[in-house]
Image: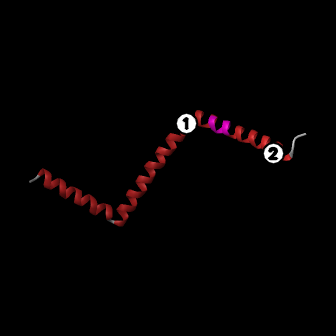
Amino acid sequence: MMSFFHASETIFGARVSHIRSGFKRFFQEDKGDIVSSLGWMAIMALALVAIKGIIDGKLVSYVNTVFVHLDKVFNP
């Protein structure tokens, strides 16, 4: 006769392996979708940071200093 702890470990182990195999199958089938979603999230994060920088005015002053330095390099 199995003890309660042994039975619960067996059930828990079966559930964990079932969940693990489900995640493995999901990542194998939908890997491109996940990578694509992460890529678009990164692009949107950069766009939001740029928009916030433009609104705050910090990005505009930074871009102006970059162009001033470029003018110094190309027009000595």
For label 2, the SS is helix
For disc 2, the marked residue is 8
User: Which residue of the protein is positioned furthest toward the bottom in this rendering?
Assistant: 56
Q: Residues within 10 Å of mark 2 (few under 14, many from 20)?
A: few
Q: Quadrant of residue 10?
A: top right
Q: Main secondary structure of the magenta part?
A: helix
* The disc label shown at residue 31, or none: 1
For label 1, the SS is helix
Looking at numbered disc 2 in the image, what kind of residue is underneath it? Ser
Looking at numbered disc 1 in the image, what kind of residue is underneath it? Lys
Q: CA distance from mark 2 to mark 1?
A: 33 Å
User: Which residue of the protein is positioned furthest toward the left in this rendering?
Assistant: 76
Towards the viewer: 48 or 10:
10
Region in magenta: 20-24
Q: Position of residue 20 (x, y in %)?
A: 66, 39
Q: Position of residue 15 (x, y in %)?
A: 74, 41
Q: Which of the image's four quarters has the N terminus?
A: top right
Q: Residue at x 13, y 55 (%)?
A: 72
Q: Residue at x 52, y 36 (%)?
A: 32
Q: Residue at x 40, y 58 (%)?
A: 49
Towards the viewer: 19 or 33:
19
In screen coordinates, is 6 left or right of 20? right
Q: Position of residue 65 (x, y in %)?
A: 23, 60
Q: Residues within 10 Å of mark 1 (few under 14, many from 20)?
A: few
